[in-house]
Image: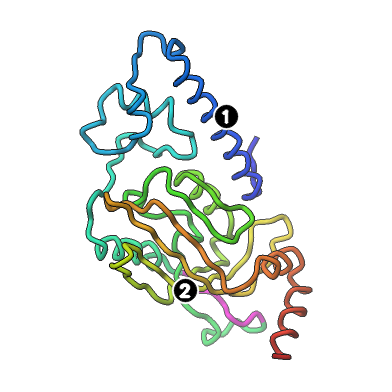
Amino acid sequence: MTIKCPFFKRRAADLIDNLALVTRFLIIRHKSLLGDRMIDPDAIYSLTTTSSDCDEGFYYLDSVMMPPGCRSRKKEQTKSYNLSIQEIADIIYHDWTSRTTVLNTDEHTTSSSSKKTHHKGYYITGQMNTTIYKDDCLFSGPDPDMPVKGLRKYLAAASKLFDHSKSYADLLELQVLSEKNQIQVKWEIGGVIMLPWHPEVKPWTGKTTYHIDANGLIYKHEEFWDISVFQAFICTVWPKVGERLFLEAKDKV
């Protein structure tokens, strides 16, 4: 059975991860469950450290201990450790802008003047350079479906959230905050949500802050919206009601 709704898909993944964490606890407490495979308990808290750890025992530990949503798709995948913050910023910029889409901005006409080229990055496609992120990166934000812990889990749901042919995510600005070891981007997103009634959400703006650890990997992906969660919910579930309600409120200001 395939779960199509992004919300329930993530919740199902959370349940699987929680079961995996309980299993990990039992294995730590009762090493006999591993049979003859003896594992150093200290190693449990230092997964995905350096390539020198990637021996047979490490991979066994990774496959047993790491929650499914936090595992790499390929266990031999190499992380891009110790890049400069500018190099990381360049990769993030590429993830946002390398894919584009042409959309009609006026539903009442099909003339070329009404069409505009937009970015279609990982917020829409779920495709990005994962080597600069920790596998257990925390994705937080105002979305009721967050926080989500686990790179693989986040991308699996993100790729199914928007209709790729009718949605966009424009990068408006990118800032390198060297003193905080952070990178911040401003964006605008609009398009069609992959729900049964295919609601079209009007463009909204926000920011994403990428927090970088001492090894040069992103450990937290923090999202902020310029609209309230209530407004986002109303506009998604009842698009016409939301448009009338919030546009009228904006006109009165």
Mark 1 belongs to which amino acid?
Leu
Which residue range is magenta in the image? Answer: 101-107
Rendered location of residue 80, percent (x, y): 26, 49
Q: Earlier in the sequence, mark 2 or mark 1?
A: 1
Q: Is residue 211 above or below residue 3?
A: below
Asked if the stretch drawn in magenta spans residue 102, the answer is: yes
Tag 2 near tag 1, CB within 8 Å: no
Crowd around label 1: few <14 · some 14–19 · many ≥20 (10 Å) = some
Mark 2 belongs to which amino acid?
His
Asked if the stretch drawn in magenta spans residue 103, the answer is: yes
Viewer-side residue, 30 vs 242: 30
Rendered location of residue 224, percent (x, y): 53, 67
Q: Is residue 205 above or below residue 62?
A: below
Quarter where residue 221 is shown: bottom left
Q: Residue, x 43% and y 76% (percent of image)?
A: 172
Crowd around label 2: few <14 · some 14–19 · many ≥20 (10 Å) = some
